[in-house]
Image (tube, helix red, strand yellow):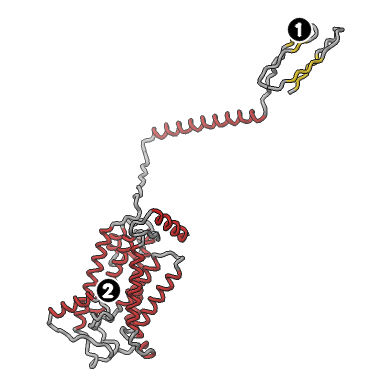
Amino acid sequence: MAASELIHDSDDDRPHVEVNVETINPPTPPHPSKVSNGNLTPHAPSPTPPTDAQGRKNKQGCSKLSSRLQQSQLIHTLSNRIKRQCDYVKITVTEEPADRLPKEWWKTAVAFLYALFNLFFTTVVITIVHERVPDKSVNPPLPDKFFDYVDRVPWAFTVTEVNGLILVGLWLVQWLFLEHKAIIGRRCFFLIGTLYMYRCVTMYITTLPVPGKHMVCAPKLYNDSTGKIWRILRLISGGGLSMTGSHLMCGDFLYSGHTVMLTLSYLFIKEYSHRWMWWYHGICWLLSASGVICILIGHEHYSIDVVIAYFATTRVFWWYHTMANTHALRRAPNNYLSRTWWNPIFNFLEKNVRTTVPIVFSCPVALPSFCRRSYSIVEGGKGE
């Protein structure tokens, strides 16, 4: 920085001297300059005038300080006034539980026992109803519009049972890999038990004749209780399937248990799998639909048996999941779905489930760390 100083005296005839002083390093103070008479002229430091930015900052700081003082005074005034009042408003805030999806395996076990009991009770009712089925030589099959246009195919019912086994197996594997299998499992067990209990009622109150003369029914035992017990055990051991040779009794027509399992398995597979698995849903739908149609092609059930089974299965499934996924309906005064007889059981099973069950898959057995990382990356990408 260059500084020049010109010393001029009008009354003095001595020649004036112009001295230029250059300072390269600003922190070092400037040296005093000498003039011709030997006197030293000190440099007085000139005060730096404040810039506009610094002035603005000072004003802003003052305004912030004043606003804070005003706020503190206002808070102090309000607190004093509140203390003087005698009426206080108490607001209670309910704390949400930390776990919104508790497993509660003991409830799943209760639902499993409920399903197991109704399945066993179904075999008992089939054994009872079998004794009441009218002889096909006396009472021929009822007229059915589907049978009028489609002739019987002997192997069709085997296709039905094979498709049912495939769907149940796929659903079992899928259920094992679900993260919230305890909640989903008790829903499945409850619906199976309820639908088969309904089936026991319809079978018992209305006994239909055999739908075709091809059907071979086991002889009636009448008062032979021991023989009936052995028939029940044989039916249970064979899973109630005709292909195992364990189901030789008639009368369990209204409504179709095969249709229940084919439809219910598909509904659970689709409900608890991601949307991007459309190909998987399509394959399961084809298995379910073809299995139901083959029941009619094999003339093993009347058309009304299949229709009622489909409507009963889909409606109970959709009613239950509407209540489970719409939490505002559970305590709504105008919710007519809560008037079902099984609503107390629903409240018992779903009481602590406070959100919609997400579709999350996890390996049921422990995997090595690198496998878990790869699986989580793939699952996260597909979930997007």
How far is disc 1 from disc 2 in space, using C-alphas? 123 Å
Callout in the foreground (1, 2): 1
On screen, 47 above or below 174? above
Instruction: Report the front residue among 93 and 21.
Output: 21
Residue found at the very far right of the displayed protein: 13
Question: Viewed as shown, does residue 93 lie left or right of 249?
Answer: right
- Residue 198, label in figure: 2
Give SS at disc 1.
loop
Asked whether the viewer can see residue 336, the reply is no
On screen, 110 above or below 294? above
Residue found 78% across the figure and 16% down from its top: 5
Asked whether the viewer can see residue 60, the reply is yes
Quarter-of-image position of residue 135: bottom left
Q: Position of residue 104 (x, y in %)?
A: 28, 57
Q: Position of residue 11 (x, y in %)?
A: 85, 7
- Amino acid, disc 2: Tyr
Residue found 59% across the figure and 31% down from its top: 60
- Amino acid, disc 1: Asn
Badge 1, how many Cα within 10 Å: few under 14, some, many 20+? few
- Residue 165, label in figure: none
- Residue 39, label in figure: 1
Badge 2, how many Cα within 10 Å: few under 14, some, many 20+? some
Earlier in the chain: of badge 1 and badge 2, it is 1
Q: Position of residue 170 (x, y in %)?
A: 36, 69
Quarter-of-image position of residue 280: bottom left
Instruction: Indicate the quadrant containing the N terminus: top left, top right, bottom left or bottom right.
Output: top right
Q: Position of residue 204 (x, y in %)?
A: 23, 79
